[in-house]
Amino acid sequence: MPVESPKILTEVQLKTLIASQQGELDAVLMYNALAKTVKDPGDAETFRRLAAEEGGHAAVFKALTQQVLKPKKTKAILLPLIYRLLGKKRVYPIIAQGEYDAVKKYEPVAAQFPEVESVKNDEQRHGDTVLSLLE
């Protein structure tokens, strides 16, 4: 959801929003890397869709921060490696928990910035989606 005009942010708000933006950008790389790694084509398609949605979330935060950030590759390297070592039954719950942790992190942010509410709701759905791949 586009922001009409940049808001004046406190230093704490800006740091929180930048960290959120960074997390979303990193998730794009992670989900795309997982899509290339997983064995199940349905899982791969789901991860590509989630990557696209995380990109949209990053755009919401970018509109608030007015900052251009670069994604970090750490999760995009580690999660596929862990997937290869441990398999989806161990890795998917870790990924889902990361999404649920984002929901908690975004609660106070959404209270201050209503445009983040849909992002928070999507993160809950993402966690549920990743866990549903285990069924």
Image (cartoon, helix red, strand yellow):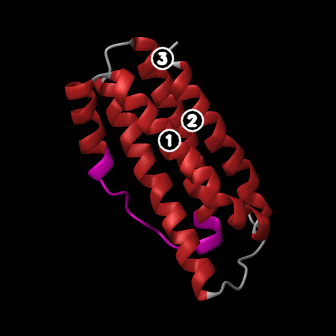
Which amino acid is tagged 1?
Gln
Residue 63 in magenta stretch: yes
Quarter residue 37 falls in = top left
Q: CA distance from mark 2 to mark 3?
A: 12 Å
Instruction: Residue 45: give x, y in percent of width and height.
Output: 47, 21
Instruction: Residue 64: give x, y in percent of width and height.
Output: 65, 70
Q: Is residue 40 visible?
A: yes
Depth check: give the residue in front, 115 or 85: 85
Relative side of 94 to 54, left or right: left
Q: Quadrant of the N terminus?
A: bottom right
Q: CA distance from mark 3 to mark 1?
A: 14 Å
Instruction: Residue 116: give x, y in percent of width and height.
Output: 71, 58
Residue marked by disc 2: 127
Pointers 1 and 2 in contact (C-beta within 8 Å): yes
Residue marked by disc 1: 97
Which amino acid is tagged 3?
Leu
Q: Earlier in the sequence, mark 2 or mark 3?
A: 2
Q: CA distance from mark 1 to mark 2?
A: 7 Å
Mark 1: which secondary structure?
helix
Quarter residue 108 falls in = bottom right
Mark 2: which secondary structure?
helix
Q: Is residue 1 visible?
A: no
Q: Residues within 10 Å of mark 2 (few under 14, many from 20)?
A: many
Which amino acid is tagged 2?
Gly
Mark 3: which secondary structure?
loop
Depth check: give the residue in front, 26 or 111: 111
Nearer to us: label 1 or label 2? 1
Pointers 3 and 1 in contact (C-beta within 8 Å): no
Q: Which residues are magenta?
A: 62-75
Residue marked by disc 3: 134
Q: Residue at x 37, y 57 (%)?
A: 71
Q: Residue at x 46, y 61 (%)?
A: 22
